[in-house]
Image (cartoon, grey):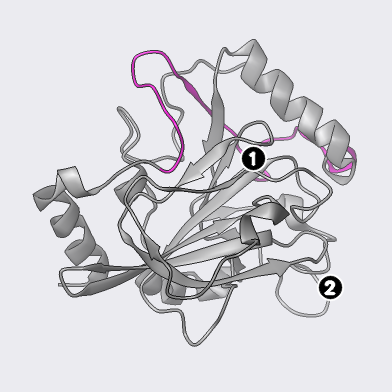
Amino acid sequence: MDLSAQLARYIKAHTNRVGKVVDFDRGTDRLYHLDLTAGNKYPDAGTIADTVGFDRWITAKLHDNNCRYGIGGYMEHRTIYAGILLFDNRSDEPRFMHLGVDIWAKAGTAVYSPLPGKVHSFNDNNNHGDYGPTIILEHNLDGLILYTLYGHLSRKNLDGLSAGRPIRINQKIGDFGVIEENGHWPPHLHFQLMFDMEGKQGDYPGACRYSEKETYLKNIPDPQLILQLPEAVNVLKQINCPEG
């Protein structure tokens, strides 16, 4: 059995051991799917380049569709990364394949650990287009080691942290950061799962080359296994919310 299947089996057998990543009221909250592939012609390159304008566009989409959060991104081929040096140096194959799920909401939105564990590592990845403040937790699920990554947090969330610090299920670990400190993106959370950190500390690729997709799929399971969004089988599909 591969590791993703082991994780799915663990979660199915221990539903009471999986908590929340963000506050979500299944009775009232709605999710809007944000498609950031070439298949969606808007936002255009000009909007993406203007982070404040991009933020206004996302905020309007959520407001107009009465949705608390925007969501999407797992294994999404994101052409919006074109021209951002971190992903596209124009000499090698670009890193457009997004490996986590993005949850879009206003700055200050609370972030929680959905599993008990400990702090593995953390870092302020302070580059344009990068994660900004990042926390990585380590979880031991009856012998299956899983890491959860939380990117684009507030810089204050790193204050006083130390590797090895115990973390409880549903413990608040951070907040969505503002544009000026989160890698210069509209406020959101990049949430990602890994089975192997490959020796990395405070960082792990959030995007890869399309040619590397199958390799990364072995190490990075679908975050929906943990998020368990209502009526969602695949987070790349629209959930409970009409197109706007």
> What's the residue type where badge 1 is placed?
Gly
Residue at numbered disc 2: 90
Residue 83 rendering spot, x and y as whole percentages? 85, 61
The label on residue 20 is none
Left or right of 58? Residue 203 is left
Point out the stretch of residues depicted in magenta: 21-47
Report the front residue among 130 and 40.
Answer: 130
Q: Quadrant of residue 96?
A: bottom right
Instruction: Give the quadrant of the N terminus.
Output: bottom left
How far apart marks 1 and 2 lie (CA) works out to 22 Å
> Does the rendering let one see residue 112?
yes
In the displayed structure, would residue 19 be above or below residue 229? Answer: below
Q: Residue at x 65, y 15 (%)?
A: 63
Q: Secondary structure at mark 2?
A: loop
Residue at numbered disc 1: 39
Q: Residue at x 62, y 32 (%)?
A: 105
